[in-house]
Image (cartoon, grey):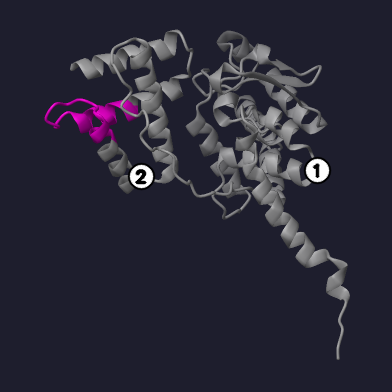
Amino acid sequence: MSEFEKNIEEYLEDCESRRKLSPKTIRAYRTDLLQFSAYLEPLPDSRPTRDAMSDYLAVLHRCYKPKSVKRKIASLKAFFHFLEYEKRIVKNPLANLRTHFREPIRLPKTIPLQAIEAILSSAYQESQRSGITPEQARVVWRDIAIIETLFATGMRVSELCHLKKEDLNLEEGWIRIYGKGSRERMVSVVHPSVLNSLKTYSLLAVSYIEQSGYFFLNRFRRHISESSVRTLIEKYTHLAKISLHITPHMFRHTFATLLLEEGVDIRYIQQLLGHSSILTTQIYTHVAARKQKDLLAAKHPRNKMNFCN
């Protein structure tokens, strides 16, 4: 292992032990940093000089989309800041190097309300299927509760998968969510059907939940994975005969966009989503503006006026 790779491992250990970053974030850092280390290896002095950094940024821009480049640069910046703080390097090679660039706005994809209604309807129909076994009922009600919760709270699928039983208070109607950077937020669950789905599932799985500690469980009685949530959404999308490709994260986008269209203050939406910056939340204003344009084009009274010479 090279000296540079040793620094990477010590930095990642610091991220885990002191900064308490999530395993997912640490995996992304590891990927980005080892990729850069592999780029440096064949260079004459294998050091992250300013020229090497400039060339590497050019390679990134050629090979990746702007969002991926932005993340990889952020990983390098944080790493070099650590090395500089630990006095392992004299000067940050990214210092005074132009790394800012215009990232194209990608509007979040949302789910039509009719599609959400059809997906939920197909799941509820499964729960009423004749001959359903207790184990099948537990799984179906888990799936219903997951879909209802994603749409009702706008939480990230990773946050949902790691909910623990003590994070939910179904009598008072709230869920405690631990987001990025260990930020904690509380989201109310007020719709009776959502609460009922969570209560029904928790009763059917009470012994498993008590044993595991996590709330949403897979067939091995461990916390459900993100890929399993994607699979179950695909299942009910197919049962509902919907041709759209729907992902768990689209429920989060739909939650935020619909609230904004209903006139909810963007700062409340920021809190509900767990965004550290209002700038992240403002992407939804573009979607709401597009909806506003469609509404005005279809509903404005001026459309009924016609003046002929």
Q: Nearer the viewer, residue 259 or 232?
A: 259
State yes or no: residue 49 in magenta: yes
The three-letter amino acid code for the residue at tag 2 is Tyr
Residue type (three-letter) at the residue carrying disc 1: Gly
Residue where numbered disc 2 is placed: 64
Q: Is residue 272 left or right of residue 30?
A: right
Question: Which residue range is magenta in the image?
Answer: 31-53
Residue 129 appears anywhere in the view = no
Where is the C terminus found, in terms of image quarters? bottom right
Label 1 CA crowd tier, 10 Å (few <14, some 14–19, many 20+): few
Q: Hey, which residue is sitting farthest front in the picture?
A: 96
Tell me which residue sits at (39%, 39%) in the image: 69
User: Residue 307 location in percent, x, y?
Assistant: 87, 84
| Residue 27 percent location from the top left of the image | 38, 24
Mark 2 and mark 1: Cα distance apart in space: 37 Å
Q: Is residue 297 magenta?
A: no
Q: Is residue 150 above or below residue 106?
A: above
First of labels 2, 1 by sequence position: 2
